[in-house]
Image (cartoon, grey):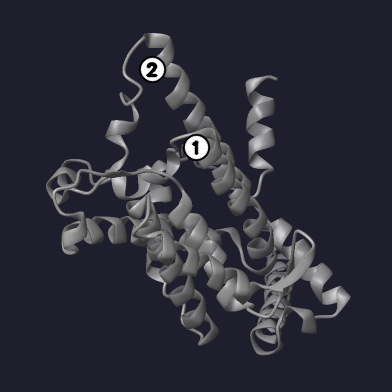
């Protein structure tokens, strides 16, 4: 497959699928490059994993985010990406890609902070060197966000239909129970991501988007990497101002009407649950999610 075709296929993916593709690519590179060069398996990941030592973090502050793109094994990668895929489908039927990325990355960050604080606050973890990798905190954040936002929506789990809040409660309780048994750092990160998802959704239901500032921050970073367009030579262009104004006004009106319909459906979900939607409303929301 040619490079332009690969780029085209990637551009067609939604934000959850793009995150999955990036994680898979990072896993392949992190596995193959050290093997082919005959160097330590830890040669790449050591620069991106999140250490529990605050002093060490000061020398690689980017690791509060980059740790989430590395995984210890195929199984570790598979289960995290499976969760991101299925929860992402529900999430992106309700919200746009920007909000998905907000919840995911903020979950990664808070999960990382829980990991670091846990190892530096609780005596049980003192004198222990640990490093955090994996997307579990981000996956937990989007899962608990959805479980909080539409708690009574039912999903199919093997042979049974289960309400989402049952799923969320089970996941959180499982992490709490396993905290003293094994992978304590990982479970701390899961709980941090879960807390972020809960807080984000509960505040959004009250009309407050706690991720708006972070979204602006991401937009600012994105603008830094955009290629500046070369200015074309000055030339005089005559346009029919009336036609142009009419076209712009119609496009603005259509966009505002479309957004108002989405907002009305989301408001109905927050008050009465997803199942209260009619089939046309569900279809409209699904199509709007694909367009974002």
Instruction: Report x, y in % for residue 220.
Output: 38, 55
267 sits to left or right of 142: right
Name the foreground residue: 28 vs 191.
191
Residue 215 % position (x, y): 43, 63
Figure check: 243 above or below 150: above
Secondary-structure class at tag 2: helix
Res. 215 in view: no
Q: Nearer the viewer, residue 122 or 106?
A: 122
Q: Which label sits on residue 116?
A: none
- Mark 2 vs mark 1: in front: 2
User: Helix or strand or loop: what does disc 1 sit on?
Assistant: loop
- Residue at left offset 51%, top offset 38%: 23
For the point 19% across and 63% down, the residue is: 122
Residue at 31% x, 40% y is: 49
Residue 99 left/right relative to 46: right
Comparing 54 with 251, the one in front is 54
The dot on residue 233 is 1
Quick check: 44 left or right of 278? left
Left or right position of 22 against 274:
left
Q: Residue furthest right?
A: 279
Residue 199 x %, y %: 44, 76
**Residue 7 figure quarter:** top right
Quadrant of image for the C terminus: bottom right
Query: Residue at 38% of width from left, 52% of height from top?
Result: 186
Q: Is residue 262 above or below residue 219?
A: below
Asked whether residue 192 appears in the rendered view, the answer is yes
Residue denoted by label 2: 34
Which quadrant of the figure contains the N terminus?
Answer: top right
| Mark 2 or 1, nearer chain start | 2
Q: Residues within 10 Å of mark 2 (few under 14, many from 20)?
A: some
Cα gap from disc 2 to disc 1, whole angstroms: 50 Å
Residue 59's place in the image compared with 290, above or below, is: above
């Amino acid at each position: 497959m040619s490079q332009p075709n690969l780029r085209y296929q990637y551009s067609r993916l939604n934000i959850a699928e793009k995150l999955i593709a990036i994680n898979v690519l990072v896993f392949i590179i992190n596995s193959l490059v050290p093997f082919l060069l005959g160097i330590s398996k830890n040669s790449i990941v050591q620069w991106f994993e999140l250490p529990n030592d605050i002093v060490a973090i000061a020398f690689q502050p980017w690791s509060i985010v980059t740790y989430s793109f590395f995984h210890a094994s195929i199984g570790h990668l598979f289960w995290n990406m499976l969760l991101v895929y299925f929860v992402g489908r529900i999430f992106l039927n309700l919200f746009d890609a920007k909000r998905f990325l907000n919840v995911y990355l903020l979950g990664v960050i808070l999960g990382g902070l829980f990991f670091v604080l846990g190892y530096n606050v609780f005596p049980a973890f003192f004198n222990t060197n640990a490093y955090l990798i994996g997307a579990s905190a981000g996956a937990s954040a989007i899962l608990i966000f959805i479980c909080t936002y539409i708690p009574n929506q039912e999903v199919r789990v093997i042979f049974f239909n289960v309400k989402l809040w049952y799923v969320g409660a089970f996941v959180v309780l499982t992490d709490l129970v396993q905290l003293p048994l094994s992978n304590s750092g990982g479970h701390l990160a899961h709980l941090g991501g879960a807390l972020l998802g809960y807080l984000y959704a509960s505040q959004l239901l009250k009309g407050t988007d706690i991720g708006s500032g972070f979204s602006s921050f991401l937009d600012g970073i994105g603008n830094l990497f955009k290629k500046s367009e070369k200015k074309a030579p000055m030339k005089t262009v005559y346009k029919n101002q009336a036609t142009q104004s009419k076209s712009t006004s119609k496009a603005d009106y259509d966009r505002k009407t479309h957004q108002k319909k989405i907002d009305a459906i989301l408001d109905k979900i927050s008050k009465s649950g997803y199942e209260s939607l009619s089939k046309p409303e569900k279809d409209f929301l699904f199509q709007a999610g694909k367009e974002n």
